[in-house]
């Protein structure tokens, strides 16, 4: 399913074993204090639940997906509506709402149900892409009235959905109080996604895209994440995700705060160019983030509400992240909250009932016998019927905007926006925004509701609201939110916002100036101060890509705004000013001959070597650019993360830059190493800067292991059934010191590393204990073909000339593929020499490697691996 199991072992069978939450059976953790948890629906109704959404009245919509993340056969998915008429926490009835394959996100709004899913050709039975669609159920019978209406088509990479499945495709959807649908895009990216207006958009890599509910105005919100599955959005439009990265050293989970226009760097900037990105708030180690929800409901205990709740499939855990304001962003503290086997999603209704879905061992391709839904409510919870908003008056809807419930505010807002009496609806929303006695959440809901109802007619009132200190940030954001309405918006409130002491206001002003598109803003943006933390990582070191850095946010956003303005002339002119560093940062992304010629022309006028070197570095960065993305390729699960580009190509400005750099290098022969390092860092591949030929380094001798001999020995493990072995291992503690020795003698070391300092081989084991429990690890050793870890499928490559190679890919760039076979032999192939490439179904790890072990020895090996949590 989803990008599901980001396991760290060749045969990652991520089943939770006996610990399933089945009502009266134990969960992975004790139930959180103050909550009552019950089983709502089982696998007989909701097998393989990939996603869910809850209507305000409590109707639960579940996306059943028996294709899974790696399956490819259509006709196995559907959306179900589950109802609980007596509100006792158990499903009373269900209907088949609609038939769709690979449902990845659901959102309910009035009579409309939005669904993100994979599409298939009826003729070929092959995937044709992903679409965001909307169904309608006007008669409320639990069945869609007719076929879906497409809002966005081609919202993923068709080639790789066909080849791999949806594991890195486009995922969850959620609406913010600003009325945009926020879409989580995995790093398959997409090419020529088309919205309902005909607008086309291409995105290389992952991030967040947003669109209006009518399927228009599609745009990129943030970029540079690996595999976002869902977003949590708070009442103040802070967007949070729990995504991950991979550079061959494990799949590390990152909790991030997404700021509009931000670049988060994966995969080409997040290690060696971290001065250019917005870092995640924390790296918590191995895992696999799935569903997300910002809970803001008054019926819940105070310790559980007004927090982002983030599901982690790999850890079978729902986490709370306690966020604390830090400049324009936050710091955080992660807490375990609720254990649920392979949790996929969660949502809450207008009465405070939370519903959560468990994949529960349904595998990579779904299962008809696994998966269920639970309900969680506060112990003192009582049912409160959610009003029928279609029958509410404008005044009643305005009262609901004042509710402490985020569900009530959002749904009342959308109902007001849809009313035919726009004047009355706008007046009601504006009155809520202006009422200083109301909560900030309600007033902000009033601002965004008014913005959507009033459109261009609301510009004057919103401009006035920029004078209100509480609302200034949101009024600025609302003024610049819809590009079709920008013509009559004054630049002055934004220029004033740049000087505001509140960094959140300044951030909104900077983002707004980029969206307004007025070139006169460039000079003001260039005055943004750079912090001392603006430094590129030292050679050979990884930058701080998951450490909060509030000081970098405003200059980062200013650079993004300058790039949106394409302010080449202003940036070149600023190179000789105090704004030089910010200007040169922005110029790194402006592949324009005016930028190249301008930098070369200004270079002789510079007085310090430091500034001259910054210009040289900027030109080196501009020497190549990223190839246009056509969705014919993808960087895989273990991409080359050197940067600054993945598939670099020369362009019109390359010859002039090369000529300039060579000329400067000749002037300063003593600085040859400087230019060699510059070339290596930016991968220019200019022959004149190549390092002098050195003797090839002697390869480190690795232990040679006879795997055939090992697997043919028979001990207790080889003579017993897998079930008996698992029972025995569960009852034996094991000695981790002995396990460490066995890791070598049993051949594990041939394919696995356990230290970040070692050369990465096959699946990294240094954090396996943070992903898998002892039972999972044991089962993975005993059943290597049960499930193959992402990025470590056995691959057969046939080169031109007919010679074939089999192994797993340890490194891949746009130019070459490095393959390692089971004997540890490494082969490097040029991509241009590859005639065919095929993933095999069996793991390269042979079965039977534990055959010669006693139960105690296997338990020791498992205990050693379970302690690896780096």
Image: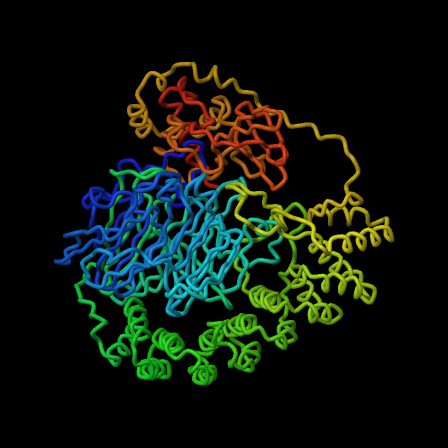
Residue 597: x percent and y percent? 76, 63
Q: Residue at x 54, y 52 (%)?
A: 204
In the foreground, 344 or 799: 799
Residue 671: x percent and y percent? 82, 50
In the foreground, 168 or 677: 168
Left or right position of 34 against 858: left
Vertical placement of 10 versus 85: above or below? above
Q: Quadrant of the N terminus?
A: top left
Vertical placement of 829 versus 623: above or below? above
Q: Is residue 51 visible?
A: yes
> Which residue is situated farthest in the left direction here?
86
Q: Quadrant of residue 355?
A: bottom left
Q: Residue at x 38, y 25 (%)?
A: 782
Q: Residue at x 41, y 35 (%)?
A: 866
Residue 365: x percent and y percent? 35, 38
In the foreground, 542 or 563: 563
In the foreground, 159 or 435: 159
Residue 323: x percent and y percent? 42, 62
Task: Give the color scheme: rainbow, by chain, secondary structure or one colour.
Answer: rainbow
Left or right position of 177 against 57: right
């Amino acid at each position: 399913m989803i990008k599901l199991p980001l396991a760290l072992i060749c045969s990652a069978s991520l089943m939770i074993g006996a610990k399933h939450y089945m009502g009266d059976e134990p969960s992975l953790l004790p139930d959180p204090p103050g909550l009552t948890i019950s089983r709502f629906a089982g696998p007989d109704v909701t097998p393989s639940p990939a996603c869910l959404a809850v209507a305000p009245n409590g109707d639960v919509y579940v996306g059943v997906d028996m294709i899974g993340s790696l399956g490819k056969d259509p006709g196995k998915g559907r959306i179900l509506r589950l109802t609980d008429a007596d509100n006792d926490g158990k499903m009373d009835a269900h209907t088949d709402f609609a038939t769709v394959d690979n449902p990845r996100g659901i959102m309910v709004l009035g009579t409309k149900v939005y669904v993100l899913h994979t599409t298939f050709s009826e003729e070929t039975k092959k995937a044709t892409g992903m679409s965001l669609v909307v169904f309608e159920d006007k008669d409320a019978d639990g069945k869609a009235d007719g076929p879906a209406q497409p809002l966005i088509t081609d919202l993923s990479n068709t080639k790789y959905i066909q080849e791999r499945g949806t594991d890195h495709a486009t995922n969850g959807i959620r609406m913010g109080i600003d009325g945009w649908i926020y879409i989580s895009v995995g790093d398959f990216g997409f090419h020529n996604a088309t919205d309902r207006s005909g607008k086309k958009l291409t995105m290389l890599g992952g991030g967040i895209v947003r669109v209006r509910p009518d399927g228009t105005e599609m745009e990129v919100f943030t970029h540079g994440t690996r595999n976002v599955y869902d977003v949590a959005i708070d009442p103040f439009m802070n967007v949070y995700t729990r995504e991950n990265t991979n550079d061959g050293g494990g799949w590390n989970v990152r909790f991030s705060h997404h700021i509009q226009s931000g670049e988060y760097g994966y995969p080409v900037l997040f290690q060696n160019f971290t001065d250019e990105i917005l870092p995640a708030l924390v790296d918590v180690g191995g895992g696999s983030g799935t569903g997300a929800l910002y809970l803001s409901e008054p019926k819940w205990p105070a310790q559980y509400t007004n927090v982002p709740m983030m599901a982690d499939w790999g850890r079978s855990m729902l986490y709370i992240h306690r966020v604390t304001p830090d400049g324009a962003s936050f710091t955080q503290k992660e807490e375990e909250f609720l254990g649920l086997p392979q949790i996929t999603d969660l949502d809450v209704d207008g009465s405070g009932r939370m519903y959560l879905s468990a994949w529960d061992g349904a595998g990579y391709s779904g299962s008809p016998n696994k998966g269920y839904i639970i309900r969680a409510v506060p112990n003192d919870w009582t049912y409160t019927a959610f009003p029928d908003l279609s029958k509410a008056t404008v005044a009643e809807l305005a009262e609901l905007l004042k509710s402490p419930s985020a569900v009530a505010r959002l749904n009342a807002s959308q109902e007001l926006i849809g009313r035919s009496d726009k004047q009355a609806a706008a007046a009601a929303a504006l009155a809520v925004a202006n009422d200083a006695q109301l909560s900030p959440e309600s007033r902000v809901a009033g601002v965004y509701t008014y913005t959507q109802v009033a459109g261009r007619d609301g510009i004057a009132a919103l401009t006035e609201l920029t004078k209100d200190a509480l609302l200034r940030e949101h009024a600025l954001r609302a003024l610049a939110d819809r590009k079709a309405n920008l013509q009559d918006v004054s630049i002055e409130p934004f220029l004033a916002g740049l000087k505001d002491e509140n960094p959140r206001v300044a951030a909104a002003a900077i983002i707004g100036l980029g969206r307004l598109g007025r070139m006169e803003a460039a000079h003001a943006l260039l005055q943004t101060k750079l912090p001392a933390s603006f430094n590129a990582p030292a050679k050979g070191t990884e930058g701080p890509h998951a450490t909060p850095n509030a000081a970098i946010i405003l200059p980062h956003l200013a650079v993004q705004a300058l790039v949106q303005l394409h302010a080449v002339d202003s940036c070149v002119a600023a190179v000789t000013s105090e704004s030089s560093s910010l200007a040169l940062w922005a110029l790194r992304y402006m592949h324009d001959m005016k930028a190249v010629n301008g930098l070369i022309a200004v270079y002789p006028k510079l007085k310090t070597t430091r500034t001259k070197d910054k210009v040289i570095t900027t030109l080196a960065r501009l020497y190549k650019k990223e190839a246009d993305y056509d969705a014919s390729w993808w960087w895989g699960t273990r991409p080359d993360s050197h940067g600054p580009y993945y598939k670099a190509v020369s362009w019109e400005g390359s010859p002039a830059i090369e000529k300039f750099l060579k000329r400067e290098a000749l002037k300063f022969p003593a600085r040859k190493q400087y230019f060699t390092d510059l070339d290596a860092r930016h991968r220019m591949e200019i022959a004149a800067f190549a390092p002098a030929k050195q003797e090839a380094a002697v390869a480190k001798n690795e232990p040679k292991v006879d795997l055939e001999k090992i697997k043919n020995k028979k001990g207790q493990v080889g003579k017993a059934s897998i079930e008996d072995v698992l029972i025995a291992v569960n009852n034996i503690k094991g000695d981790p010191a002995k396990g460490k020795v066995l890791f070598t003698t049993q051949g594990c070391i041939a394919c696995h590393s356990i230290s970040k300092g070692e050369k990465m081989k096959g699946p990294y084991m240094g954090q396996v204990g943070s992903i898998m429990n002892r039972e999972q690890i044991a089962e993975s050793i005993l059943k290597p073909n049960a499930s193959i870890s992402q990025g470590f499928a056995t691959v057969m490559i046939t080169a031109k000339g007919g010679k074939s190679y089999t192994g797993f890919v340890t490194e891949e760039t746009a130019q070459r593929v490095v393959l390692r076979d089971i004997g540890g032999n490494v082969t490097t192939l040029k991509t241009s020499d590859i005639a065919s490439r095929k993933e095999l179904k069996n793991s390269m790890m042979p079965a039977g490697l534990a055959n010669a072990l006693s139960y105690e020895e296997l338990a020791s090996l498992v205990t050693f691996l379970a302690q690896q949590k780096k």
